Amino acid sequence: MTDPLAGGEIGVGKDGEMLVPRALRINIVTIFPEFFTGPLDLSIPARARDAGLVEYRVVDLRDFTHDRHRTVDDAPYGGGAGMVMKPGPFFEAVDSLGASGPIVLMSARGRQFSHRDAPRFSEGADLTVLCGHYKDVDQRVAEFLATEELSLGDFVLSGGEPAALAVIDATVRLLPGAMSDIDRARGDSFFDRELSAPSYTRPPVFRGHSVPEVLLSGDHKRIAEWREREGKRLTELRAKS
């Protein structure tokens, strides 16, 4: 059978052997490879890598330049402020990786990344993420190299690295085995297009603020109904804001 949350076969094969999910290969192209060292060594991204579920390949864009200064940017044609990242290093970097899956350029012009993208990425064999910097990236990278442009929202970051981390984390946590309890993912906000209900833990009263009585009742049917109502209510409130 195939897990609906992620790619790769799971279960038992025709010969009775357990089928092991294939590793997702994630390629990251950046001028700051050290940016990813800490985050990918923590929490679920690290556990998934150590379990053989994902392989990270972080590529330094400057390794694909051909001048002694390892230049990746130049002045924009037509004038204007800021510098533009050159197309050549991006194309050469991706060529060296042999990327076969989606090639995503993190860009303020891109469509906003959402939960529906994460399962799609996790189901593939590989994912390549291109991190821009400076004023802009040469448009030929967006049009003739990347298969899609994505953003995190209507704001500008200093570079594509933080956005790339968000995409990678959202993708990796859906790989089968990345989380000890896959139901945690199914209960997340946006998994079924709705926000999840609020969560509470001990103590039942904190600084005069109480946990909703239904959550303390032990009545699982009422709790499930409350969570469904609260999820719908919060989703409607967000839609109106």
Image: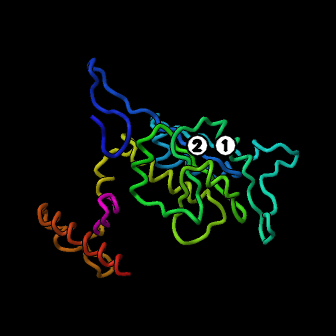
Q: Residues within 10 Å of mark 2 (few under 14, many from 20)?
A: many
Looking at the image, which residue is at 62% across and 48% down? 145
Q: Is residue 101 magenta?
A: no
Residue 211, quarter of the rendered image: bottom left
Q: Position of residue 10 (x, y in %)?
A: 31, 33
Looking at the image, which residue is at 31% across and 72% down? 235
* SS state under label 1: strand
Amino acid type at circle 2 is Asn
Q: Which residue is mark 1?
A: 59
Looking at the image, which residue is at 65% across and 61% down? 159
Amino acid type at circle 1 is Val
Q: Position of residue 98 (x, y in %)?
A: 60, 35
Q: Is residue 84 left or right of residue 234?
A: right
Q: Residues within 10 Å of mark 1 (few under 14, many from 20)?
A: many
Q: Quick one: 135 or 238, which is closer to the camera? A: 135
* Quadrant occupied by the N terminus: top left
Q: Is residue 240 visible?
A: yes
Range of magenta residues: 188-197
* Quadrant occupied by the C terminus: bottom left
Specify the label residue 27 is tagged with: 2
Asked if the residues shown at circle 1 and circle 2 are in contact, with their CB atoms under 8 angstroms apart, the answer is yes
